[in-house]
Image (cartoon, rainbow, N blue to C red):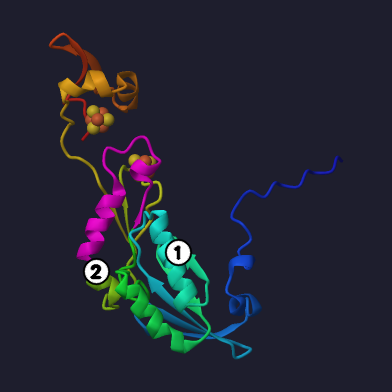
């Protein structure tokens, strides 16, 4: 039998080079962990080595100025090692417990809340929205920002009956939004068309093709090419 070609590894990169040295050294050999306060985790290894993790919330979609700011805080107040969680929280690992409080203060001073652990409402995951997807009529990320502003206290405290994971998505495909509470963000009325703008800015065939129930049709309005919506067909 011919020799099988080995698979090409194109998934997540090897995390070891980026991991805190204490975590690399004690990989798979942890004997104890606790939760000293909201947003802080403590782990002790069989070797006696210790590590603290400080979790901060971010605005999820970040520009490079924000990422540089977060990285500078890691260099100045942490050990220079961070990881982003699936919900875009950032976690700083430090091997010296005396660094925890100055690190928390530095993050708070820049506006990053500390929390998201244990019985808190962790950061809301959202689907791609307008950043990458070409079908959302709404964006999930802006809604997440507004929701987390409301849920700020539930992120920084751990007073829920259990862990709470939430998500938002901008259509029922819900491409990334598995959670305890999943919110689908949608318009509830058929779209209104600004006929003055359509001819100049809209690629009409793409818009027509995008509607799953063929409710959008090309139309001539006031002698200009535009679109019309059959509101009886529209599923919103
Ligand atoms: S939830 Fe739907 S509209 Fe939103 S990014 Fe995913 S597939 Fe696109
Ligand atoms: S059903 Fe069609 S017309 Fe209605 S909101 Fe969805 S894409 Fe737009």
- The answer to whether 158 is drawn above or below residue 96 in the figure is above
Quadrant in the rendering for residue 27:
bottom right
- The answer to whether 148 is drawn above or below residue 108 in the figure is above
Can the viewer see residue 173?
no
Residue found farthest to the right:
1
Kindly identify which residue carries mark 2.
152
Quadrant of picture, ligand 2: top left
- Disc marking residue 85: 1
Disc 2 element: helix
Q: Which residues are magenta?
A: 125-152
| Camera-side residue of 46 and 112 | 112
Can the viewer see residue 232?
yes
Quadrant in the rendering for residue 73:
bottom left
The residue sitting at 53% across, 83% down in the picture is 95
Residue 163 spot, x, y in % from top left: 34, 71
Residue found farthest to the top:
223
User: In the image, is residue 140 part of the stretch drawn in magenta?
Assistant: yes
The residue sitting at 16% across, 21% down in the picture is 196
| Camera-side residue of 226 and 164 | 226
């Amino acid at each position: 039998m011919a020799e099988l070609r080995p698979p090409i590894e194109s998934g997540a990169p090897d995390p070891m080079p980026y991991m805190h040295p204490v975590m690399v050294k004690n990989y798979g050999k942890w004997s104890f962990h606790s939760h000293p306060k909201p947003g802080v985790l403590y782990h002790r290894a069989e070797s006696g080595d210790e590590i603290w993790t400080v979790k901060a919330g971010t605005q999820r979609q970040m520009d490079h100025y924000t990422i540089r700011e977060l990285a500078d805080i890691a260099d100045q107040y942490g050990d220079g090692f961070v990881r982003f969680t699936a919900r875009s929280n950032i976690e700083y690992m430090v091997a010296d417990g005396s660094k925890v409080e100055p690190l928390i203060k530095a993050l708070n001073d820049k506006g990053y809340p500390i929390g998201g652990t244990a019985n808190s409402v962790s950061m809301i995951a959202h689907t791609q929205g307008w950043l990458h997807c070409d079908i959302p009529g709404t964006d999930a990320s802006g809604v997440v920002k507004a929701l987390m502003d409301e849920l700020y206290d539930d992120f920084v405290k751990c007073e829920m009956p259990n862990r709470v994971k939430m998500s938002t998505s901008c259509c029922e495909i819900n491409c990334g939004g598995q959670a305890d509470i999943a919110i689908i963000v949608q318009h509830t009325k058929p779209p209104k068309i600004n006929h003055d703008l359509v001819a100049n800015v809209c690629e009409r065939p793409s818009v027509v093709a995008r509607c799953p129930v063929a409710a959008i049709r090309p139309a001539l309005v006031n002698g200009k090419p535009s679109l019309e919506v059959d509101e009886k067909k529209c599923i919103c």
